[in-house]
Image (cartoon, rainbow, N blue to C red):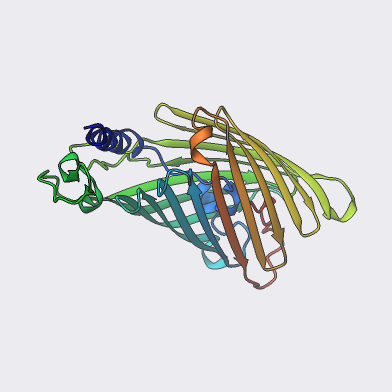
Amino acid sequence: MKLRGIIKLSVFIFFAIVTTLQAQDLQFTQFYANPLYLNPAFAGSVRCPRICMNYRNQWPNLSGTYVSYSASYDQHVDAINGGLGFIVTQDDQAHGTLKSTQVGLIYSYHLAISRKVSIRASLQAGFFQKTLDKTKLNFGDMIDARRGFVWNTNEQIPSQSKTNLDFSGGAMIYSKRYYLGIAGHHLTQPDEGLQGSSKLPLKITAHAGAMVSLEKGNESFISPNILFQQQQNFTQLNLGMYFVKGNFVGGLWYRNSDAFIVLIGLQADHLKIGYSYDVTISKLSNNTAGSHEVSLQIQFGCKKPRPRHRPDSCPSF
């Protein structure tokens, strides 16, 4: 009876998670290693073609809880005076029981307002698909008191899928020394409900930072940063600092009432690799084992930029 009660409670908790958290976007700790996900205005911001790939395993002690992937491509195109981008993200919860996939195409217009300052304004159009796989759920009537899960369930919960269009936008202003951006995701608040209607809430992101040189030649500098996000009743404030010395990058972040983040990275002319670890400080700290994240960026070469095109100065991770 005790085991049966635990399983029923687990099923209840699972559906509570589906109901309350599916409206909250997945998060990546290495914000600038996944630039198009942070703000679509980053499309084409480094001018040359760029590929970014990200992997995140959140709370690994809770097996299969949240595993997220992202891949994107972007570059500047002189003929349209802006950048084009493509991004795919996937969030896998409970070993594929609940999957969310998003695909987006981005255009980011570039305008040089002076020799030192540029702005970008963008629009992202795409779609998402959310899928619930009933075959991976466990129910109380599947349990034998001695042998565990051996029976088929009589519960009638069909596998479900929801697909809808989604639109986002963003803007940023930047120079060699500072950068400031704002983005709005899910502008039309599309329906993502698997059982009844459930609007995907608007997410607002604001981010800013600066580059402070520690020696001539920009071989060594620090970069203080701030990131604010709000989605429905969920609010998150991130405060952090990067340190760059040649090819080495280190970083420390604090996410309000949730985690301290440690980051290390290596960057060369065409390749950047980063690893970060979230040290959970919330009430979940004893059970989750934090979160791990790995990023890879490949930067391709291209023709010399126009005199009025300035690549952004944001950090790589």
**Where, by quadrant of the figure, is residue 77 drawn?**
bottom right
Residue at (55%, 49%) from the top-left corner?
Answer: 292
Measured from the top left, where is residue 200 in percent x and y?
32, 38
* Between 14 and 203, the one nearer to me in the picture: 14
Is residue 245 shown above or below 6?
below
Q: Position of residue 196 (x, y in %)?
A: 18, 37
Q: Where is residue 201 drawn, in percent x and y? A: 36, 35
Observer able to see residue 115? no
Q: Which residue is outermost to the right?
A: 216
At a point 30% along the width and 34% down the height, the residue shown is: 13
Residue in view at x 58 percent, y 57 percent = 295
Residue 35 coordinates in the image, percent (x, y): 56, 52
Quadrant including the N terminus: top left
Is residue 23 positioned above or below 117 on the image?
A: above
Does residue 143 lie above or below 229 as drawn?
Answer: below
Residue sitting nearer the eye, 202 or 139: 139
- The answer to whether residue 83 is visible is yes
Q: Is 130 on the left or on the right of 114, as rendered?
A: left
| Image label count | 0
Along the line of sight, which residue is nearer the eye, 55 or 305?
A: 55
Displayed quadrant of residue 281: top right
- Please state which of residues 317 and 48 is positioned toward the viewer in this rendering: 317
Left-right relation of 304 to 199: right
